Image (cartoon, rainbow, N blue to C red):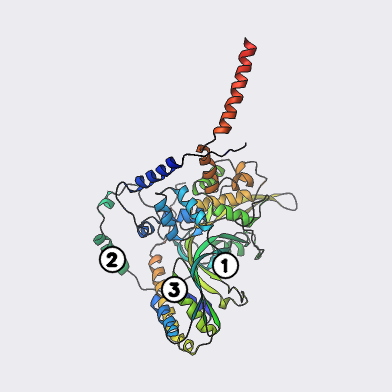
Amino acid sequence: MKRRRRTRILIEGNPILAKRLSETITATYEWKEIIAPHYGLTMVKMRESAKNSLFYIGEVLITEAKIEINGAIGIGIVEGMKEQIARQLAIIDAAYNANLPETQGWGADLLLEEVRINEQKALEQTKLFETKVDFQTMEMDS
Amino acid sequence: MGYVAVKGGTKAIEASMERLTYERLKEQEIIEVETIMATMKSLIDQVMSESSLYSPFLAALAIKQAEGSMEEAVFLLRAHRSTLPRLYTSETVEPETMFVERRISASFKDIPGGQLLGATKDYTHRLLDFNLLEEDKTQITTWLKNFENNLEQTEGKVTYFPKVVDYLREEGLFETYPLNDTAPIDITKESLSFPASRSARLQVLTRGQTGAVTALGYASLRGYGQVHPTVGEVRVGRLPIHTAHPVEGSGNPEDDFYIGEIRVTEIESFVPITKKNGRNEEKLEFEIGYGICYGQNETKAIAMSILDQCLDHPEGDFPTHDEEFVLLHIDSVEATGFISHLKLPHYVTFQSKLDSVRQIKRGVSDDES
């Protein structure tokens, strides 16, 4: 599974999943913390929809970590102040970059969690749809 | 005007700071940062937007430290931001990827996908609710349980909404612009110069002080400007943020990192504009004023959309169409900082002014005698 999809599942999903997958790796392989979880900023570049040009809306606080396993470096980045998940994400990223055999078996778990996330979002949206409004214009006396 | 430093007063300043702590603690009540995060969302949204740093936790901490003073909280967060390294710049966030929580139009009754009121105070009675004085956790738990259980069948997949203006563009009622990927100016890295680029203008407006942006937008509506829009679309929702690998780059978006979501308010205002065609005949067209800010702050975002459109037409003979006037006076830290510095010691400069006045008066009385 590619990084974009995988990181969304690990960040939006149940935190137990990232913890479990990263522990599978740290229990078996030697790992080195290249950069311990630390705080920094990501500048957010947006497209405005009036003239389709780009601008910066502002910065987002993030936590970043870097881990090395078998010579492969993994990066964990997450919005907010979240040291544990940043480190776990970096370990999982390093595991994928090092092509560790454990990663082959993670697809099913990740897909299952993705289904659950999407169901949760759909549920949230269904609840929001209760506020869908049907305004009727009133007749005017001539 | 020259400045001369003062010295001394250390003991008094230390005592003053101790007094400040005393004023904060004397009622012996503690508000947790988590409580502020859970109950003061609008305040947090404003602080994040004006300080240009998205972090609900740090905004709540700043509010606690500032004891609810907006200008102080924004100052604290801006100062803290300057201590942090910028590690990444996100990939372009496309507005259509928003998970919409609220979407309304003042221009059309029926919009494709429908209008979602979401959570809004627009239709509430503005009466103080004294029941809140008696609120307790058991009540809250029961209310939440009922709210969450009372759910219709889910549709199973998330809907992403098209923009209202897309349909009007298809009809040829609004001009269509190709994607413009020119790298934006970052006003935190280079000084604002005039004429400002569109990207610089939008960045200044989105981090502007809510009251200042609102006041200038209002002034324009009242006649000190030439823009009176109809709000085409208001959106409140969450945008996903991705960033490319720092070494591999952004060759394949599927290899990007998802880092989380930011909640924003986005406005497109429709503004009628009279233009002359090739035969020098006047014709009516529509343009879009764009507004966006962190969190849910619809008044600020609408006012921003008015000012965006004002500044797009610098020929307007009003200060709200003058980008130096607007962009240099709406920043919270700059405006409150400059105003509040007036209360700090100015002894030498004021004494020199007094001396000048005394000399003039002495001159006048010498002449009279």
Pointers 2 and 1 in contact (CB under 8 A)? no
Q: Chain of mark 3?
A: A
Q: Judging from the image, what secondary structure is the residue with disc 2 in?
A: helix
Q: Is residue A14 visible?
A: no
Q: Which mark is residue B88?
A: 1
Q: Position of residue B221 (x, y in %)?
A: 55, 44
| Distance CA(mark 2)–CA(mark 1) | 43 Å
Q: Amino acid at mark 1?
A: Tyr
Q: Amino acid at mark 3?
A: Ile
Residue B315 or residue A20, whichever sits in front: A20
| Distance CA(mark 1)–CA(mark 3) | 18 Å
| Distance CA(mark 3)–CA(mark 2) | 33 Å
Mark whose residue sits in front, 2 or 1: 1
Residue A79 or residue B170, whichever sits in front: A79
Q: Is residue B41 left or right of residue B231?
A: left
Q: Which residue does the image show at 27% across and 48% down from the upper left?
A: B130
Q: Amino acid at mark 2?
A: Asn
Can you say whether A85 is above or below B295 in the image?
below
Q: Chain of mark 1?
A: B
Q: Position of residue B213 (x, y in %)?
A: 53, 48
Can you say whether A101 is above or below B233 in the image?
below
List the residue tagged with mark 3.
Answer: A85
Can you say whether B111 is above or below B305 in the image?
below
Residues beneath discs 3 and 2 located on the same chain: no
Q: Which mark is residue B146?
A: 2
**Mark with earlier residue (2, 1):** 1
Q: Position of residue B368 (x, y in %)?
A: 62, 11
Can you say whether B177 is above or below A10 in the image?
above
